[in-house]
C-alpha cells in the first residue's frame, strides 16, 4: 500500500488522473476496478472516480508496487543546458525568451535539450522545484512556439498559475505581438486580415481560403509594415486569433511569405536572400489584459513583457540580413 497527501498543486485534479500520474503502469481497467472495490480510497472512504481532490486529502492505493514508477535518483532535466534567457519572473510564472532552433517540448528526436527541461533545471537549482515533494505536478509551459521561431514563452511554477494562465490565453486576455520579415511587400501598409483555414493534419500545414469553407476556422491577423528595403519588409503583427502557423500562412496567402519559411515560402526566394533555414519571426511582446481583481494574475494586469533581442531586426536595418 502507498499513500499520497494531496498538495496545493494537485488541488482540483480528478481522482483517476491523480492515480494515473502516480501509478503510471496501472491499466485503466484496473484503476476503475480498484476504485469500485475500495482498493483505492480517499480519506479512508470509497469515492467516485471523477471526484475532485482537495488539498490535504489522503489517497490510499492498495495495489502492487509494480504499478508505480521507480523513484528517480537522477532527473533527466538535469542533463539539459543551463542556458535560459529569463525576461521576467515572479513567484508564479517565468517568461523565457526561446531562441529559434530550440524545441518547446521534447519530441521523438530530442528529449533532453528543450525549453521546458531548461526551465525545470533552472527552478530545481534555485530550490523552487523539488520533484520528490510533488505527487504529479511539474513546472509547465502555458504556450509554445515552433522550433524555428523565437520568442516569449510563459512557464508556470505551480498548478494554480498554470490553470489561470491557460484560461487567460484561451480567453484572449494575454495579447501577443510579433515581428517578422516578409519577402516583397504586403498589399497594404496596415491592415487587419480575415481569412479561413483548414489544417492538413497529415502535412501539418494550414490551407487558407478567402471565404468561409466547410470545416474552416476564422483567423484574424493585424499587421503594420514598419519599413521596406532590399526587397524585404519588416512588419509588426498582432494576433486576434490563435491558429496553426497563422502568421506564416497569412503572409504566404497575401503573396509575401516570411523570409526563411521553408513550409509556406518558396525555396528559390529564400535562397536568393541568403538561404535562411529558420523563418524571420519573433514573438517579442506579451501584454496581460487580466482584470486587476483576478485572484491569481491580477497583479499582472496591464503589464507588458518585451524582449529586445530579436536576431533579424538589427540585421534588417543595417543591411546585413541579405547575405
Image (cartoon, rainbow, N blue to C red):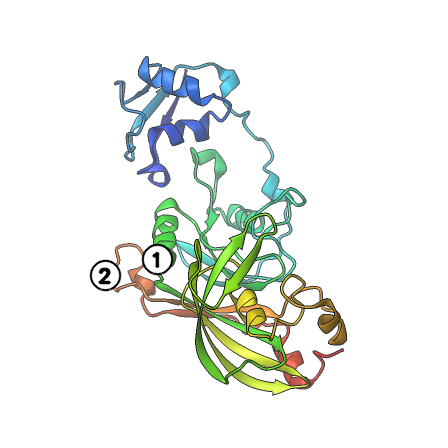
How many numbered circles does the render carry? 2
Task: Say if 181 sits above or below 23 in the image.
Answer: below
Residue 134 position by quadrant: top left
- Could you say which is closer to the camera, residue 258 or residue 110? 258
Q: Quadrant of the N terminus?
A: top left
Quadrant including the C terminus: bottom right
Q: Which label belongs to residue 168?
A: 1
Residue at horizontal 43%, vertical 55%?
A: 214
What residue does disc 2 label?
293
Q: Is residue 245 visible?
A: no
Where is residue 36? Give x, y as percent: 32, 16
Q: Is residue 245 left or right of residue 6?
A: right
- Measuring from the top left, give residue 177's x and y in whole percent: 47, 71
Residue 175 in sight:
yes
Residue 11 place in picture, x, y as percent? 32, 38
**From the viewer's perspective, is residue 50 above or below residue 142?**
above
Asked which secondary structure carries label 2, the reply is loop
Q: Which mark is residue 145?
A: none
Residue drawn at (51%, 23%) of the image: 25
Q: Element under label 1?
A: helix
The outermost residue toward the left is: 293
Q: CA distance from mark 2 to mark 1?
A: 14 Å
Q: Horizontally, is 109 left or right of 12 in the view?
A: right
Residue 298 lies left or right of residue 282; in this view the side is: left
Quarter where residue 6 is shown: top left
Position in image of residue 270 (x %, y %): 71, 71
Q: Nearer the viewer, residue 72 or 297?
A: 297
Give the class, few, some or many, for how many residues have Cα within 10 Å of label 1's Cα (few <14, many ≥20).
some
Q: From this view, report whether residue 143 is shown above or below residue 19.
A: below
Amino acid at each position: 500500500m502507498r499513500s499520497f497527501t494531496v498538495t496545493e498543486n494537485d488541488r482540483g485534479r480528478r481522482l483517476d488522473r491523480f492515480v494515473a500520474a502516480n501509478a503510471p503502469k496501472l491499466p485503466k481497467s484496473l484503476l476503475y476496478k480498484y476504485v469500485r472495490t475500495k482498493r483505492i480510497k480517499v480519506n479512508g472512504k470509497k469515492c467516485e472516480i471523477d471526484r475532485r481532490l482537495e488539498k490535504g486529502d489522503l489517497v490510499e492505493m492498495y495495489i502492487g508496487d509494480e504499478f508505480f514508477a521507480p523513484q528517480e535518483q537522477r532527473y533527466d532535466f538535469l542533463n539539459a543546458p543551463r542556458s535560459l534567457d529569463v525576461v521576467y519572473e515572479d513567484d508564479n510564472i517565468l517568461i523565457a525568451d526561446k531562441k529559434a532552433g530550440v524545441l518547446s517540448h521534447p519530441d521523438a528526436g530530442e528529449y533532453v535539450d528543450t525549453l521546458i527541461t531548461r526551465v525545470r533545471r533552472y527552478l530545481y537549482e534555485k530550490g523552487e522545484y523539488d520533484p520528490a515533494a510533488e505527487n504529479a505536478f511539474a513546472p509547465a509551459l502555458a504556450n509554445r512556439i515552433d522550433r524555428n521561431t523565437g520568442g516569449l514563452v510563459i512557464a508556470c511554477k505551480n498548478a494554480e498559475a498554470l490553470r489561470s494562465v491557460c484560461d487567460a490565453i484561451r480567453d484572449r486576455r494575454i495579447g501577443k505581438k510579433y515581428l517578422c520579415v516578409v519577402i516583397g511587400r504586403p498589399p497594404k501598409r496596415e491592415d487587419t486580415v480575415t481569412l479561413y483555414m483548414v489544417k492538413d493534419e497529415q502535412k501539418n500545414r494550414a490551407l487558407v481560403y478567402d471565404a468561409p469553407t466547410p470545416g474552416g476556422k476564422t483567423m484574424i491577423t493585424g499587421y503594420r509594415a514598419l519599413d521596406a528595403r532590399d526587397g524585404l519588409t519588416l512588419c509588426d503583427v498582432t494576433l486576434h486569433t490563435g491558429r496553426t502557423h497563422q502568421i506564416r500562412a497569412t503572409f504566404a496567402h497575401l503573396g509575401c511569405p516570411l523570409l526563411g519559411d521553408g513550409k509556406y515560402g518558396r525555396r528559390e526566394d529564400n535562397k536568393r536572400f541568403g538561404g535562411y533555414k529558420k523563418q524571420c519571426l519573433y514573438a517579442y511582446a506579451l501584454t496581460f489584459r487580466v482584470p486587476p481583481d483576478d485572484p491569481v494574475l491580477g497583479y499582472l494586469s496591464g503589464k507588458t513583457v518585451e524582449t529586445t533581442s530579436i536576431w533579424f531586426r538589427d540585421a534588417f536595418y543595417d543591411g546585413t540580413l541579405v547575405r
